[in-house]
Amino acid sequence: MISTDKYEKKIAELKTQCQLKTDECHEAWMSLTGASEQLEKVRMELDDKFLQYHYLDQAMEEQAANLRDICSRYEHDKRLWAALVDDLEKKVKNMKQEHCQLTREAYECFDSIPELSKMVFAVQALVAQCDALKLKFSEEQAKRKMLYNQIQEAKGNIRVFCRCRPLRNEEMQSGFATVTDFNAANDGELGILSGGLTKKIFRFDRVYTPQDGQVNVFADASPMVVSVLDGYNVCIFAYGQTGTGKTFTMEGSEQNRGVNYRTLEQLFKISEERKETFTYNISISVLEVYNEQIRDLLATSPISKKLEIRQAPEGAHHVPGIVEAKVGNITEVWSVLQAGSNARAVGSNNVNEYTKNLMTEECTKSKLWLVDLAGSERIAKTEVQGERLKEAQNINRSLSALGDVISALASKSSHIPYRNSKLTHLLQDSLGGDSKTLMFVQISPLEQDLGETISSLNFATRVRGVELGPARKQIDVGELQKMKIMNKPVLKVLIILKLDKAKQEVRSKDNALWKLEENLRNFEGKAKGKDQICRIQQEKLSELEGKIASKTQLCKHLEKQLLQLSEGVNGKEETCLSLQQKVKELENKLRAHEHAQSTTLQHKVCQVKELENKLKERTQEFERHSAMLNQKVIELENKLQMEGGNQGFQMLQRKMEELELKLRQQEQQEHMLPACSADKSGTTSNERKAWSRVQTPGQMDPPSLRSLNSTNRAINQESVLLKGTDTLHQIRRRRGLQSIGTENTFLASSPLLDKRILSSESNKGRHIDQSKALSRLTRSTKPAATVHRALSGSNLYKDQLPGNKDKYNKSKFWLR
Ligand SMILES: Nc1ncnc2c1ncn2[C@@H]1O[C@H](COP(=O)(O)OP(=O)(O)OP(=O)(O)O)[C@@H](O)[C@H]1O
């Protein structure tokens, strides 16, 4: 009994120690749970901070990107505007320079105005001088005209040039003898050999050898052209035997123009030279006198009406109805002459006359007769009959009438028989005292033509012997009044012609003056234009400056915003840094706390292990003692059996049974407590009542105790302390499950955690202790805001966490 009490005492002590350890473990667990909760809170705060930091970081990045964009645009605009400003400044500088230049030039021009006025005075003086010179010139011109006429008169108003045709090829080949001697041709003498011995000398104004060309011939005839343009009637005609070169001299060929063409060419040339002083209206008529009938070769109608010669009231003769083609240049004249030539009667042997009517501004109306007479052969020689005879007779009549006129003029007869033939009648105004006449006497060099040659030369000599009076200008009486009015201006115009050089000087001065004025005007215009451009550019510049100012203001505003944003960013960065710092601190704290917790836990675990070991040792000791007690009991029973009677033995056996019962009740009590706490979820209220009854063995009824005794007999046979060891193992296992569950709940409810960690399947079977799980969560930067809610909402967590149960349950749990 004493040993049993001892054991009972020891058991009670051990139980007390065990209870104390269990309480310590419970406290440690509770503190761990509290630390975990705090840790969780800190983690959540950390996650929230991380999230905020992340958002702030994003906002900051966006702001930084915006700022960078604004900065780059600002830089670009700045560069652009700077370039524009530079460009404009350059332009303005150039324009200012140009403006200065133009102002300088304008001032120079302004300064040169006195010089210009001086020049104007000089020019006016020159003009006055010019007027004086013009007067002198007109006087000189009048004198020149007078002298020219005097010379012409001295030379004779009828001038005769003799021209001999060259021998033809066949004539030369045939060896025909010639009778002409040109040794003194330059002196105007022509020798004609007569009978091979005697030589007769003829004197003319000019004698042309067969070698003299058209140019030489016309050179002597050209003064007549000046006379025509000066207002005198002129008649140039060729007289001579057929085939001696009359047409050649008067018309010539296209390559070798004759007197007609060259005279007209000269006429237009001089009129062109005089165009500033005179206006010549030149008209041309081409007519033919055939069988004493005037034929208009320019008439377009095939049947031309009969043309008659009429005398105008002022005395001039004209042919009414004849075509007068107005010509402006030699080309037109040539085409008109060609038309007349084409219209000429084919095979006709008659007089062809070209007249030029010239009307000048001084109201003179002069005529130029260019006459190609028919051959002057004697009828006997021509031996023609019928119509040809009649034609030859008419030709001879014309020529003899011409001869008669010439003779009458030569003898200064009172009556000049102009009207004896159409030819002399037509030439009346141009063949006489008031006009100038030039006759080409054409001769043949052949001996066989000697008679005709002598006849022609004699006729020419007679013509040359005619002494005409001084020529008169053919003034149009109808325009006389006009002429009187225009006399002075005409003179003036003539002076201008003569004083060409002075006029040119005046003109050049005028031109220079005009140019200077023009330049001045141009400069003024340019200056105005430049001023306007300058104003426009200045306006543009001011506009651009305004723009630049607004841009600068905008830039400043942007810079301010940038600064504010930078400050904000800096503030945010500082906040972030402080937050990071805090996070770090918290992490450190957490780590330290974890470390402390883990250290404490390890310490506790070690303590629990030590306690377990001690418990094991005690249990083993207890077992040993039990075994010894059992041995002693058996020994005592045996002794009793041997020494005492059955009565004492039965009493002892009863006592043994009572002791065993007590022991069993204690065991039962110990055994029922963990079963109740382990199967709490499935425990009903009745069972709890039963459990409460079991707790107090004194209150238990004997049958229940008995039944319990019988049901637990098997257990009783085993070690009670071993069962206690199993219970500790179960606790450890549950704790492990709690850790796994907690971890899995964390993982399942934190979507931002790493996916590998998220995989609950892979982690389900793994045993992860809390310290590792916490460290992993601490390493994770992803927030887990829902962790606490997930944890608090989890039934498993609620059931398994001892902190969520009442103290009584906790104590029950840890009693186990
Ligand atoms: N000085 C000259 N030089 C060269 N050839 C000339 C010269 N004179 C006349 N002839 C030539 O002589 C020929 C006859 O000349 P042209 O017809 O002019 O004579 P004509 O006197 O007019 O004759 P007609 O009285 O029959 O009209 C032409 O072939 C012409 O070329």
Image: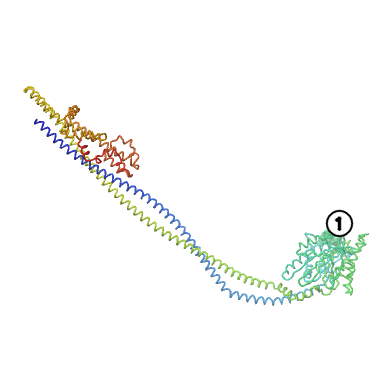
Q: Along the line of sight, which residue is nearer the eye, 526 or 360?
A: 526
* Above or below 141: residue 780: above
Instruction: Pinpoint residue 522: horizontal percent, then vertical percent.
Output: 59, 68
Rendered image quadrant of residue 699? top left
Instruction: Pinpoint residue 614: horizontal percent, then vertical percent.
Output: 16, 35
Q: In the displayed structure, does residue 378 sit left or right of residue 816?
A: right
Rendered image quadrant of residue 18? top left
* Above or below 23: residue 330: below
Q: Along the line of sight, which residue is nearer the eye, 160 or 779?
A: 779
Q: In the displayed structure, does residue 163 sit left or right of residue 628?
A: right
Task: Sort mark 1 into few (<14), some (14-19) or many (20+) by Cα contacts within 10 Å.
Answer: few
Give ligand 1's quarter of the image. Answer: bottom right
Rendered image quadrant of residue 711? top left
Q: Which quadrant: the C terminus?
A: top left
Instruction: Pinpoint residue 395: horizontal percent, then vertical percent.
Output: 89, 64
* Above or below 399: residue 732: above
Q: Along the line of sight, which residue is nearer the eye, 511 or 728?
A: 728
Q: Which residue is depicted at the point 68% across and 75% down?
A: 130
Q: In the displayed structure, does residue 752 sit left or right of residue 354?
A: left
Ligand 1 within 8 Å, label 1 CB? no
Name of the residue lying farthest toward the left: 643
What scheme was used to colour the molecule?
rainbow
Instruction: Pinpoint residue 615: horizontal percent, then vertical percent.
Output: 17, 34
Disc 1 secondary structure class: helix
Q: Which quadrant: the N terminus?
A: top left
Q: Which residue is mark 1?
A: 174
- Residue 445 seen in the figure: no
Q: How many marks?
A: 1
Amino acid type shown at disc 1: Ser
- Residue 766 seen in the figure: yes
